[in-house]
Amino acid sequence: MSEIWRKDTEKLANEIRVKSLRMTSKAKASHIGSCLSVADIFATIYSGTAKISPETVDTPARDRVLVSKGHVAAAYYAVLESTGFIDLSELDSYCQDGAMLGGHVSARVNGVELSTGSLGHGLPYGVGLALGLRVSFPGTRVFVVMSDGELDEGTTWESALIANHHKLDNLVVVVDRNNLQSLDTTENTLALEPLADKWRAFGWNVVECDGHDVEKLRDAMNKTGPLMVLATTIKGRGVSFMNNSVAWHYRSPSEEELTDALIELEVK
Amino acid sequence: MRQAFVRQLLEAAKEDPNIVLITGDLGYGVLDDFAKALPLQFINAGVAEQTMASLAGGLASLKKKVFIYSIGNFSTLRCLEQIRNDICSMNHSVTVVSVGAGFSYGPQGYTHYAIEDISVMRSISKMNVYCPSDSYEVSVVLTKILNEGKPSYLRLGKGGEPLLHPSNLSSDFEDGVTLRSGPDATMIFTGAIGSQVIAAAEILSSTGIEAEVISFPQLSPISVRKIQNSTSILFSIEEHVTRGGFGSAVLEGLSEADSGRRVRMLGVNYDGYSLGSHSYLQDISGLSAAKIAKYVNSKLAS
C-alpha cells in the first residue's frame, strides 16, 4: 500500500513539474525554480496527507492548506488541476488576459483558501484558522507552505510565539528549504541558521527531512504541532540545468529549454 | 465612547459565541470585563499587530465576527497590508477598531496621533469606515457592523467624549444626522470634533449666522443625499488631515452626484509634531470652536 502511495505521489509530483514548466514557458512567467522545488511537498499534501478533496471544498470540517509562498502559483494550480479542483483549460490560460489563474495564488480559484503573493501572510492567517478550528472542528489541521526566504518576515516570528503560546497542535508548517531566495542564498542574504534550533527554542516540534522524499515528507507532516517541517529541497529540482540557480527564480523556459526539461522529466 | 463600545460588544458576544475580540496588548481597564466574562472569545495577540490582523482573517474565515483593537496607528497603519490582503480582499467580517482618534492622546506625542487613518482605511476596497462622535453613534454603528458582517473600520475617541445627540438614534444614519438647522451655512463633521463644531455654531449664532450642523458617523460608503442640493457653503470639519479624509470623501460623493455645491474643507493643517493637550492641539490646528467659527465667518464674508 505504501509503495503504491509512494509511486502515485511521485507521479503527481512529476505532473506538477511538467505542468509548471509548460505554464511558465507559455506565459513567459517567473518562479519555475521554486515550482520545481516545492512540487514534492504539494504532491504529499494533496495525496491524502491533508483531508481535502473537490467534494469537500466547502465543508467546514476540512483541513486547510495555505500556500504562503504565493509565487509558486503555477505549481499550486497544477496540483489543484491534477487532483480535480480546477479544469485543465484553466491551466492553459495561466497569466493570459482576463484569466482566472495569475502569477500569484488567488482565492478566487476553487480550492484556494487565501490569496497570497506578499510573503509572511500565510502563517499568521493559519494561526487564526488553527485557533478557530481547534475549537470548532477538532481533528482538522492547517497546513502552511512557506519559503525559506519568507522566514525573514517579522510576522513569521510573531506567529511562532503565538502558535506556541496557544499550543496549536493542529498547525503544520512546511518550509521549502532550498537555501536560495530572490538574489542570493538565504545565508548570504539574512542568515537563518541554526534554523531548526531557532524553531525549537520557540517551542515548536521541528522535523528536518528530505523535501523530495514523499514518504519522509508525509511522516514528518503527521507529527504533532505546532509543527515545523524543514524540508530540504533543491531549487529547480528535476531539471538539471535549473538546479540551484537564482536565475530560474525569474527566467522562464524558452521552447528549447522546455523541450530539454520535459525530456529529463518524462524519460525518468 | 470606548466604554460604550466594549459594553455593547460584550452584551452582543454573550448572545453570539462567534464574536471574538482580539487586542494587541492594549486596553488596560477597558477590556477587562469582556476578558473576564468571555475568556474563550477574547485573545491578547501580544504586541504583534500584523499577525493580529492576519490571524483575525483566519478566524473570520470560520464565520467568526472578529474585532481587533489597538491604538489609532497600531491597528491600521502598522498592519495595513494584512488588512488589505487578509481581511478586505477576502471580504471577511473583521472590524478594525482604533482608539485615540485625532489628537486624543495629547501629550503622548506624534506616534499616537491618528490623523491619516481615515484616508488610508477608506481607500481599501470593501472597507466600511465609521467614525462615531458620541456613545449614541457608537451604538447604531456597532449594531450595523454586527448585522452586516463586512470588513469595517471603527474609529473611536479615547474616552470621556460628551454626548452630542439628545437621545438614541435611529438606524438610518448613513446620510448624516442633523444636530442643528440653519439657512446660512452647513457644517458637517465626523467624530468627536463635533463638540467643537456645535460650539462654533453657537458662536456664529450669536453673530446672527445660523448654520446647519450634521454629523457623519459613516464615511465609507459616503452618502451625500442630504447635502448635495443646498446652495449655502458646505464646511467639512475633521480632526484628521484633509488629504483623503472626510472632506475628500464628501467631495468625491458630490462629484459623483454631479453637485455644484461649494465646499470648504477644514482639518488638521500642521505636521503633527507639536505637543500638548488635546484641546491645545485642536486649537493650533484651527479646530477649536472659536477658530472654526472664525473660519466659517471669513469664508461667508468672502
Image (tube, rainbow, N blue to C red):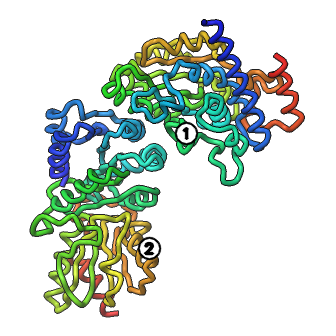
Instruction: Assign a secondary structure to mark 2.
Output: helix
Q: Which mark is residue B195?
A: none
Q: Is residue A125 above or below residue B124?
A: above
Q: Check chain identity for marks 1 and 2: say if they share one.
A: no
**Quadrant holding the C terminus of chain B:** bottom left
x then y, percent, for residue A206: 49, 13
Instruction: Assign a secondary structure to mark 1.
Output: loop
Looking at numbered disc 2 in the image, what kind of residue is underneath it? Glu
Looking at numbered disc 1 in the image, what kind of residue is underneath it? Asn
x then y, percent, for residue B4: 15, 52
Q: Residue at the spot x=33%, y=77% of the render?
A: B225
Residue B273 in sight in this render: no
Which of the chains bears the disc numbered 1? A
Instruction: Name the side, left or right, on which A99 lies relative to B289.
Output: right
Q: Residue at the spot x=32%, y=80% of the render?
A: B227
Image quarter of residue A257: top right
Mark 1, residue position: A110
The CA span between labels 1 and 2 is 36 Å
Which of the chains bears the disc numbered 2? B
Looking at the image, which residue sits at the far right? A256
Looking at the image, which residue sits at the far front? A55
Q: Residue at the spot x=26%, y=72% of the render?
A: B176
Contact flag, marks 1 and 2 (Cβ < 8 Å): no
Residue B295 in sight in this render: yes
Q: Is residue A105 above or below residue B240?
A: above
Image quarter of residue B157: bottom left
Looking at the image, which residue sits at the far left? B166
x then y, percent, for residue B253: 41, 74
Please rate how many residues cluster around mark 2, counting C-alpha atoms within 10 Å: few if below 14, some from 14 to 19, many from 20.
some
Mark 2, residue position: B252
Q: Residue at the spot x=35%, y=28% of the render?
A: A131
x then y, percent, for residue A50: 51, 22
